[in-house]
Amino acid sequence: MHHLGLTRSSLKPDHLLQTPDAFVRTPLPGAERVEFVIHVGPQPGARFTQMTAEFTADGSLGPTPAQRFLYVIEGELELTAGDRKHVLAPGGFAYLPQGAPHTVRARDESRAAVIEKPYQCEAGAPGLDILVGDEAAKTSVPLLGDEALRVRSLMPDGPGYDFAVNTMTYEPGAALSMVEIHIMEHGLLMLEGGGIYRLGDSWYPVQAGDFIWMAPFCPQWFGALGKAPAKYLIYKDWRRHPLATPGGSA
C-alpha cells in the first residue's frame, strides 16, 4: 500500500527521528548473517555510530576499530572475550574497550543495539576492562527525586570512560522536569511505550522501535503518554573537555 510519502521520520540540522517504516538494512564488512539498520554515524554530524544488528541463527559481528557497546533486545548472543564466554539474553549488555579481541555470535534469531565510538584518551586514566552485565541487576534510581522517572546506569562512571549508556523508564504521565540544552549528544532507542519528544522547535509522537539522534545543544524534552510505562536506551558522550578530539586528550 502506498502512503503518499507520509512518515513520522524527520531530519533537521540538530536532530533526527528515524521510525521503523523508514529503516533500510545493509550488510557491513566482516559480519556474517547479520543485517544492520545504521541509525546514525559521522555523515549527519554524530561523533559515534549507533546501529541495530539483526542476526539470523549463527550470525556473527565483524571487528570494530572503536569501542563497542552491545545491548540485547531479542534472542541470545554468545560473547567470547579474553578467556571467558558469556551468554547475553534480553537486557544483557557488554562493553568492549577499543582494541579488545572478542567475538559475538547469535544462538538464534536476535536483535541488539550496537554503539561504537572512537576512544578519547585522557592522560593518567586507568586502563579499561571488558564489562558484561544485566540491566535487571542494576539499581534503579529516581531522576532528580522523581519516583515516576527512574534511571539504570549500564556503564561505570570514572575518568577512563568517555561515554555513558543508561535506560530510563517513565511511568504514564511522567516527564522530564526541564527542557535540557547541553553539550552532550545523544543516541536514543525507544524500547517500550511512547510519548511526546520535543527536539529543537519540533514536537514528535514517538513509540517503541523509534530512534532519535540529538546533536550537542539541541533543546530536548520527553513526556510519557498512554497506559503503560515508556522506556528507552540512551547514549551520551561524557567526561571529556570540549576541546578534546577523538583519539587525543584535552
Image (cartoon, rainbow, N blue to C red):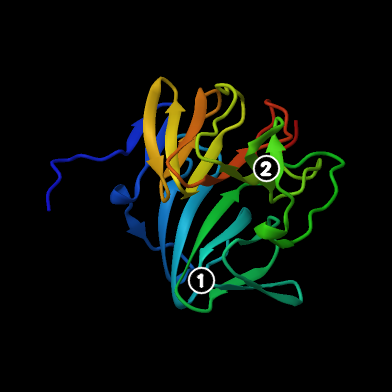
On the image, the x and y values in percent for residue 123 come to 83, 39
Bin the neighbour count of mark 2 within 10 Å (Cα to Cα): few under 14, some 14-19, many 20 and up.
many
* Residue 9 located left or right of residue 59: left
Pointer 1 residue? 75
Bin the neighbour count of mark 1 within 10 Å (Cα to Cα): few under 14, some 14-19, many 20 and up.
some
Amino acid found under the numbered disc labelled 1? Gly
Amino acid found under the numbered disc labelled 2? Phe
Q: Nearer the viewer, residue 55 or 7?
A: 7
Alpha-carbon span between mark 1 and mark 2: 26 Å
Q: Nearer the viewer, residue 64 or 134?
A: 134
Callout 1–callout 2 Cβ contact below 8 Å: no
The answer to whether one can see residue 130 in this image is yes
Q: Nearer the viewer, residue 108 or 127?
A: 108
Q: Residue at x 79, y 45 (%)?
A: 160
Give the image quarter of residue 168: top right
Q: Is residue 83 above or below residue 152?
A: below
Q: Quadrant of the C terminus?
A: top right
Pointer 2 residue? 163
* Residue 32 located left or right of residue 140: left
On the image, the x and y values in percent for residue 102 come to 66, 69
